[in-house]
Amino acid sequence: MFGSSWFSVRTRGCDGVCVDMSRPVFQMQVGSSQRGSQRTFSVLDRLLLTHPVWLQLSLNQDSAIYILLREPVGTFLVRKCSLSQRKVLCMRATADRSASSVKERFICEEDSNLALERAMFSCVLRPLRSPLEKALVALHNQDGSSQRLSQNMLRLKGEGAMERLGVRTGVPDSREVERVKQKLILMHRTHSPIDKILLLLQVCKCVHKAMGALHGDFEDFLPALSYVIVECNKPHVLTEVEYMMELLEPSWLGGEGGYYLTSVYTSLCLIQGLDKDQAFSSCVTPEAQEALQEWSCRRSRELHLLSVCPSFQRCVRILFQDGERSAVRTLQWRAGETSQALAQLCASTFGVSDPQQYTLYWRSGGEMRALPAQAQPQDLASHSEGGPSLSYLRTDHDFSKMRRLTRGGAVDLSESVCEE
């Protein structure tokens, strides 16, 4: 039921405003039925503009059921569980009047920074993954490292591999090696370095589990890891590791992530540089040590640069309205930038020719107020659960003609936000 593609939102104090989420774009009539102008809101626009209606975090379970039983099927709200402190989606699923007609499910919430990072990877790295991979492969073909790695993997694989690699602990069996191989194949398909490092962590933990509780030091782990890499025979792991080392945000390179990533890199360097009659050694080669040291210093400098730069920024939804023109856009408001800079960005985004005639407004306590000239995103961050809601309007706008909005200042989608 909760996988259904439609919901409805009904607000009190309005004439039965219903948002049908089954359509990707919502066409609404502005004002009375005699007025023919239409405004377009996306699904996300509707959810953001109506969040004071359905986001009721203070409600308990009994209150939520009581409210929803008085509303049509498909009406939903979001409350917070007092025990787990997790958000709960409550929706009236059937028409009967019993409490069982209201279904509840916990909402899986993702860290906003991680969500934005994943979105950036999807937008930027998905089209770039193939050219980056080709460049890395060409680089390793040119210096011969890729060929040496492939040849040594084939030579070491098979019977006697554990002895040649100096393995003194337990290792994953053939079934587990096959599972590791599938994870490496999946790693090659994904474009996100976060997804890649998570798969790599699973591989390394599989090796650790097979080693046993008595063997946990690096000198035992490196041969066991090298054995699994050789048995999988996937030379592309080298380019995958370099991809992660260069593109992961520095915070992912600490702790387990950095330890296992550098362990796999060291293992690949040892396998690649192993001569025919040379015994495997778990000591890091001088070349690998120098490369890791240079990489660590460079990424540390990047982390320092990030720490001294202002990191607070907010994506704000801004409603623009001028007569029959209206639009909703998401703009980035960085720390250190005043509302004047944001207003200039609005003028450019919405194609305003006389920006001095327009002002940014925000809703505070049910009132539309001009945004202070020196306001910054952190000044408004704590005033609303869903973030500040801003409007870019003419300075001579007659707010006395604004219609009364629904509870909590939610926008009534059946009428204009600012009626003329």
Image (spheres, rainbow, N blue to C red):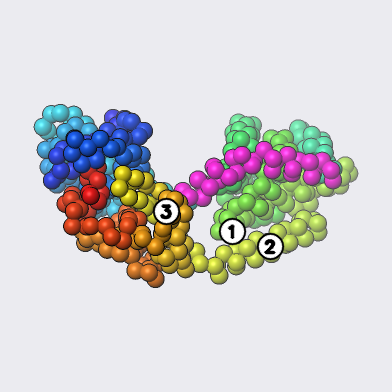
Q: Is residue 41 above or below residue 284?
A: above
Residue 206 is one of the magenta-drawn residues: no
Q: Secondary structure at mark 1?
A: helix
Q: Is residue 257 above or below residue 21?
A: below
Q: CA distance from mark 3 to mark 2?
A: 44 Å
Q: Secondary structure at mark 2?
A: helix
Residue tagged by mark 3? 352
Tell which circle, 2 or 1, labels the residue nearer the N-terminal end: 1
Q: Residues within 10 Å of mark 2 (few under 14, many from 20)?
A: few
Residue tagged by mark 1? 250
Q: Identify the amino acid type marked 1.
A: Pro
Residue 116 is one of the magenta-drawn residues: yes
- Note whether residue 48 is visible: no
Q: Residue 255's spot in the image, x, y percent?
A: 57, 58
Q: Which residues are magenta?
A: 115-143
Q: Secondary structure at mark 3?
A: loop
Q: Quadrant of residue 408?
A: bottom left
Residue tagged by mark 2? 298
Tell which circle, 3 or 2, labels the residue nearer the N-terminal end: 2
Q: Is residue 326 left or right of residue 114?
A: left
Give the mark toward the camera: 1 or 3: 3
